[in-house]
Image: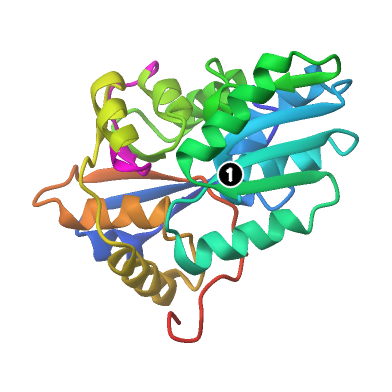
Amino acid sequence: MTILPVHIEHNSALAGWLGVDELVLVREDKLPDQGGKKRRALMHFASENKQVEHLHLLSYAGSHTAFTLSRLMPQTVIHLYGTQYGGGDYERRMTDILDAQGNIIQRTGSNLMMSVAFQREKMKKRQGHLAMKIGGSLGVDLETGAAVDHFLDTVGKDYHHVVAVASGDLLSTIYGRTEQVTGVLTQPFAIRLWKSISLPGAQGLFKASLAKRIDAIREISGIIHETWDPIFMGSVMTFLRSRKTLPRKLCIWVTCPSGISWMTPEDK
């Protein structure tokens, strides 16, 4: 059984937008602390490492992982080495949100600069300091696995699951239970190339431009009256819209925090 609820929504309007018979959303964005899949995945990690004084993380600028950790581990200083990824207003908004958190120290720069800074810190091996795997990957994610099992047991096994791929943990967790899953790659091209080879079910080597992803999120906002993020969910939705044929029954995992205002008046 899962500790956190699994929010499942059927959405016929969005099914029509994609041209499929049935569409189910797993709303991980509705989890506590502004939601996001990382809230479920990091529960046990935070509990097991609550005595850590300084936690170091190499991830993207404005990382959801860092934000979630700051809530789950309020006594720990989160050091984020945030790689800039060209996310426009969304990246700037998320970076500002993290800068406002009292227990986050965020540095931003190129992937090379932040990787070097992160590795230097790891080599120091200071007492009271812990470095996470790149991107905050956890490998085994029992709580999310239980959420997948709950979906399969209650909704059914004939849905094709679609997720955004950052660390790849969610894709691997679902793939371990059903091969009916596609992971849409979201990272910089070199990482997408590597993940497309190393992760079963990973697709989307070439992704739509940020402008096209924002256009898709704007359209979806007019349908569901909510604004999703253009980097992860934008990549998922433009990928699905580009397919000539789709499985008739889809389950889309909404994994990024909701309720974040990032669009400029021009975007809206």
Query: In this rendering, would 150 be left or right of 220?
Result: right
Residue lying furthest bottom: 265
Which residue is tagged 1? 82
260 vs 157, left or right, is right
Residue at the image position 75 percent from the left and 28 percent from the top: 55
Residue 174: x and y in percent read: 41, 25
Task: Please name the residue shown 48% across and 59% down the image.
Answer: 229
Question: In this orientation, which residue lies closer to the viewer: 189 or 118?
Answer: 118
- Among the 4 quarters of the image, the one containing residue 196: top left
On the image, the x and y values in percent for residue 149 come to 49, 23
Q: For mark 1, does the 10 Å Cα neighbourhood hold few (<14), some (14 to 19), or many (20 or more) residues?
A: many
Residue 185 against residue 126 in the figure, above or below = below
Q: Residue furthest left?
A: 244
Residue 153 visible at all: no
Q: Quadrant of the N terminus?
A: top right
Query: Does the rendering let one see residue 75?
Result: yes
Dividing the picture into quadrants, the one containing residue 214 is bottom left
Residue 184 belongs to the span the image colors magenta? yes
Question: Which image quarter holds the C terminus?
Answer: bottom left
Residue drawn at the location 44% of the way across and 37% of the way down: 166
Residue 178 position (above or below residue 107): above
Q: Position of residue 113 (x, y in %)?
A: 52, 39
| Left or right relative to 175: residue 193 | left
**Residue 24: horizontal and vertical position, in percent?**
39, 48
Q: Please check the rendered image and state whether residue 34 is part of the magenta-colored stretch, yes or no.
A: no
- In magenta, the rendered stretch is 176-189
Residue at 29% x, 51% y is 22
Position of residue 26 in the picture relative to residue 61 (left or right): left
Residue 224 in the image: above or below residue 36: below
**Colour mapping used in the image:** rainbow
User: In the picture, residue 59 is in which quadrant?
Assistant: top right
Name the kind of residue labelled 1 in the image. Gly
